[in-house]
Amino acid sequence: MSTSEQKLAVPDELGSARTKLVYLSLLELGEATASELQQLLGLSKLTLLPILSELVAHGLAEREQGTYVSR
């Protein structure tokens, strides 16, 4: 199956639409800073940072020297 034919699966534990959006964006980018995600998605840092913390807590992302990396 080619990359364009693959469907992105969203884990069931991600409840909110914003959390899913951040997860899929990070998955597509591979890695990004909070500022890059904020600019791309138009979310405030007050909204974005707890979502990134949730993704890290669920093992769906890692934080490496200020950059978030999808897992």
Image (cartoon, rainbow, N blue to C red):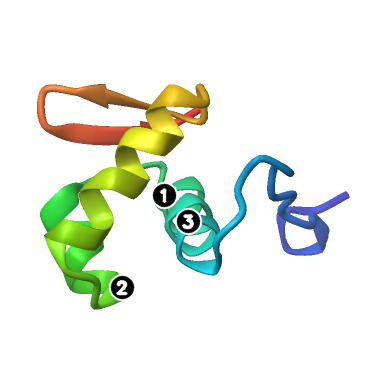
The residue under the point 11% across, 32% down is 66
Q: Quadrant of residue 16?
A: bottom right
Q: Nearer the viewer, mark 3 or mark 2?
A: 3
The residue type indicated by label 3 comes to Thr
Q: Nearer the viewer, mark 1 or mark 3?
A: 3
Q: Which residue is mark 2?
A: 41
The residue type indicated by label 2 comes to Leu
Q: Which residue is mark 3?
A: 19
For residue 42, side relative to residue 35 (left or right): right
User: As rendered, which of 15 and 70 lies closer to the eye?
Assistant: 15
Whole-percent x and y of residue 38? 19, 65
Q: Earlier in the sequence, mark 1 or mark 2?
A: 1
- Residue 68 drawn above or below residue 47: above
Can you see residue 29?
A: yes
Report the Cα–Cα distance between label 3 and label 2: 11 Å
Q: Which residue is mark 1?
A: 26
The residue under the point 41% across, 49% down is 26
Whole-percent x and y of residue 4? 73, 63
Q: Residues within 10 Å of mark 1 (few under 14, many from 20)?
A: many
Q: Residues within 10 Å of mark 3 (few under 14, many from 20)?
A: many
Q: Secondary structure at mark 1?
A: helix
Q: Earlier in the sequence, mark 1 or mark 3?
A: 3
For residue 35, side relative to residue 6 (left or right): left
User: As rendered, which of 63 and 15 lies closer to the eye?
Assistant: 15
Q: Earlier in the sequence, mark 3 or mark 2?
A: 3
The residue type indicated by label 1 comes to Leu
Whole-percent x and y of residue 53? 31, 35
Q: Quadrant of residue 43?
A: bottom left
How many numbered discs, if any? Answer: 3
Whole-percent x and y of residue 63? 25, 25
Report the Cα–Cα distance between label 1 and label 3: 11 Å
Report the Cα–Cα distance between label 1 and label 2: 11 Å
